[in-house]
Image: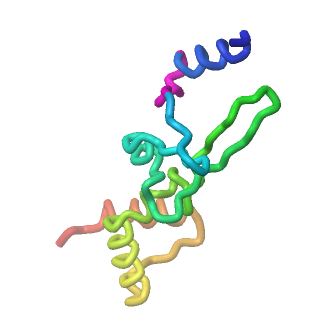
Amino acid sequence: MRLSRIAALLLGWVSGRMGFRGYVAVQGRGVVALPADLRRRLLLDQPGAQVEITERTDGVLELRPSLPIPADQAWFWTERWQEREREVDGLVSAGEVTLHADGSALLDHLEALGTADPS
């Protein structure tokens, strides 16, 4: 193993970036099955998920998850968040919102709400 690969492995381990490390078999017709826990953690069990493969000049194969919805945006598409989005859309349609020209106007409005007489 070359020094650069050893350094990359150590760097990944030290920085906590190394999750799965192991072997998978290449089956007939080139099929490679990823472990179930790895597929779930990387959201590769979602419909439309793909894996990008890159062959580097040093012979290393890099696999990257490619999701129809990027993993850092998946929270937005959860049922709970979408329910809240529909609720806000309903409030906007009913005219039950206040629009502000900028952040200062919003803060002024919130401050006025805090000092309003509750009676």
- At which x and y percent is residue 20? 47, 30
The boundaries of the magenta stretch are 14-22
Image mark count: 0
Viewport quadrant of the C terminus: bottom left
- At which x and y percent is residue 65? 57, 48
Q: Which residue is drawn at the image coordinates 50% and 35% (left, top)?
A: 24
Q: As displayed, is residue 15 above or below residue 89?
A: above
Prevalent SS, magenta region: loop
Viewport quadrant of the N terminus: top right
In this rendering, would 72 be left or right of 83? right
In depth, the one of 48 and 114 nearer the eye is 48
Q: As displayed, is residue 87 above or below residue 51?
A: below
Q: As displayed, is residue 45 above or below residue 96?
A: above
In depth, the one of 94 and 25 nearer the eye is 25
Q: Which residue is drawn at the image coordinates 53% and 27% (left, top)?
A: 17
In this rendering, would 51 be left or right of 73? right
In this rendering, would 78 be left or right of 9? left
Q: Residue furthest left?
A: 119
Report which quarter residue 82 is drawn in.
bottom left
- In the image, residue 45 lies in the stretch drawn in magenta: no
Report which quarter residue 26 is drawn in.
top right
Q: As displayed, is residue 35 above or below residue 58?
A: below
Report which quarter residue 91 is drawn in.
bottom left
- At which x and y percent is residue 60? 71, 30
